[in-house]
Image (spheres, rainbow, N blue to C red):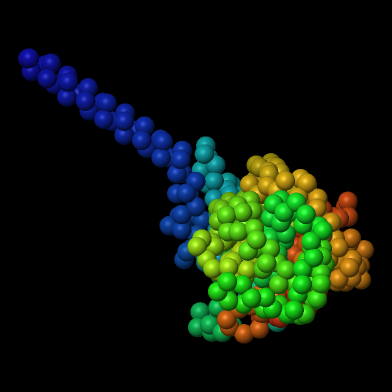
């Protein structure tokens, strides 16, 4: 082989290497360009690690929640609204992982594959984001939680629009407390969006799952009667009830939230069937709300003793659940077995006024048989009409279930989960108020207040 041929091979190899390198660069630019543009190292977008020139964030009715002014992010003038919407809006530094500032940082920066972040120079800001949440409902939910930590969520189970996402503890983003990182008693877990990411003992809200399993697997469940003497002895231990209910039917057992009846049902159903139903309701699954990963709920009764299975069947033992999953479950019951996946973004609009993307309904992975869903709907409606009273939810035609979840650190958590049967309000609601006691107290009252705000 002569020298000219060898040199030609070397040149060809260099050309091929160059083209491969260019191809890799173009590929990475297409795939990762948006990440690079929204990187905190990009001084066009960030200053000191904080977003400075992103687009505006609005609620569903056009109320401005965050915007850029003179190179700084500013927020709504109401301190209460800033606190109420902190976890859905997020912070410019990205400390709140589920906030819009973090999850949609690329969209706020206005990155475009062709023009990059040129729009920042041309318009002085990126894309505007219109959320699905209601500022009015958020304020009502924040105030309804009173002095308790926890979460309030409302969503349209037909479209998936999250109408309310309030989490406490919270703080005023415009007046950041000096002791935010040192006062653990007041601000413990303040960056966690409890609606999406929190995991809680569900308490009696879980009895809806046990009821569904009984409907599917016990043919004579509606003719059954249970004897409640305030406690029931099961193999290995005892399950305590919240009252002495005497002789109760299946429907009455759910109305009265009888631990004895549902613990016995859990043991009769067995760990395999109860686990299968729990999984169908979203337990042990990786669920999403738009681009946000929900806290993964847990239900594991493998190899447990009967009394432990009994406690699990009433929502205690080691069971943990995300409030957002509970709201999807309620939506599925209300909507004939399938509910929409929760979504937080209504639309994204470019600085020039073009709609870049718009929300489209998408079914969640939670699926219940239509027949079971219809039967549960009747039972949950009965809870309100026969136990809580329609007067607790004026004009809402409400279905629901309370929960009083026993915890190790103080008073029980107060739960309420349910949905409205009004044609114009296909809304499911969930409230968890930490250490607030009975579910018929703070949680139920908060659920009514936030729904009334949406109805008004």
Numbered circles on residues, count: 0
Position of 16 with respect to 228 (left or right) is left
Residue situated in front as seen by the camera: 220 or 84:
220
The quarter of the picture where the N terminus appears is top left
Q: Position of residue 97 (x, y in %)?
A: 54, 62
In what quadrant of the picture does the C terminus appear? bottom right
Image quarter of residue 270: bottom right
Figure check: 377 above or below 1? below
The answer to whether residue 232 shows anywhere in this view is yes
Residue sitting at x 55%, y 65%:
96
In the rendered structure, the answer to whether residue 370 lies left or right of residue 324 reads right
Q: Position of residue 384 (x, y in %)?
A: 86, 66
> Does residue 141 appear in this view?
no
Residue 450 left/right relative to 148: right
Q: x, y (%) of residue 349?
A: 67, 46
Residue under the image location 73 percent in, 68 percent down: 261
Q: Is residue 34 left or right of residue 345?
A: left
């Amino acid at each position: 082989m002569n020298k000219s041929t060898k040199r030609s091979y070397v040149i060809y190899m260099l050309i091929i290497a160059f083209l491969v390198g260019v191809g890799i660069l173009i590929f990475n630019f297409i795939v990762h360009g948006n990440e690079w543009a929204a990187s905190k190292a990009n001084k066009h977008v960030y200053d000191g690690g904080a977003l400075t020139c992103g687009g505006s964030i609005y609620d569903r009715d056009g109320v401005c929640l965050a915007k850029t002014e003179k190179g700084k992010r500013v927020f709504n003038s109401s301190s209460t609204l800033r606190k109420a919407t902190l976890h859905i809006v997020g912070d410019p530094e990205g400390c709140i992982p589920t906030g819009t500032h973090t999850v949609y940082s690329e969209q706020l920066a206005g990155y475009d594959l062709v023009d990059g972040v040129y729009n920042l120079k041309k318009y002085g800001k990126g894309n505007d984001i219109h959320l699905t949440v209601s500022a009015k409902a958020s304020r009502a939910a924040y105030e309804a939680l009173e002095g308790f930590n926890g979460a309030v969520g409302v969503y349209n189970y037909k479209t998936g629009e999250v109408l309310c996402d309030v989490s406490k503890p919270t703080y005023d983003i415009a007046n950041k407390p000096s002791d935010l990182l040192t006062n653990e008693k007041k601000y413990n877990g303040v960056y966690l969006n409890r609606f999406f990411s929190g995991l809680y003992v569900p308490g009696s809200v879980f009895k809806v799952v046990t009821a569904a399993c009984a409907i599917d697997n016990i043919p004579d469940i509606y003719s059954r009667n249970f004897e409640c003497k305030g406690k029931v002895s099961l193999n290995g231990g005892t399950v305590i009830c919240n009252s002495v209910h005497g002789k109760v039917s299946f429907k009455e057992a759910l109305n009265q939230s009888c631990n004895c009846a549902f613990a016995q049902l859990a043991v009769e159903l067995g760990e395999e069937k109860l686990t299968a139903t729990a999984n169908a309701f979203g337990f042990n699954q990786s669920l999403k709300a738009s681009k946000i990963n929900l806290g993964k709920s847990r239900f594991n009764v493998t190899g447990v003793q009967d009394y432990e299975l009994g406690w699990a069947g009433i929502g205690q033992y080691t069971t943990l659940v995300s409030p957002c999953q509970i709201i999807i479950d309620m939506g599925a019951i209300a909507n004939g077995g399938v509910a929409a996946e929760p979504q937080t973004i209504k639309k994204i609009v470019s600085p020039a006024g073009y709609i870049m993307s718009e929300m489209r309904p998408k079914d969640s992975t939670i699926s219940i048989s239509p027949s079971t869903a219809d039967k549960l709907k009747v039972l949950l409606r009965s809870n309100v009409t026969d136990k809580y009273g329609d007067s607790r939810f004026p004009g809402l035609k409400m279905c629901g279930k309370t929960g009083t979840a026993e915890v190790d650190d103080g008073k029980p958590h107060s739960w309420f989960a349910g949905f409205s049967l009004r044609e114009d309000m296909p809304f499911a609601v969930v409230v968890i108020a930490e250490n607030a006691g009975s579910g018929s107290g703070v949680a139920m009252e908060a659920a009514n207040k936030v729904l009334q705000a949406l109805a008004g």
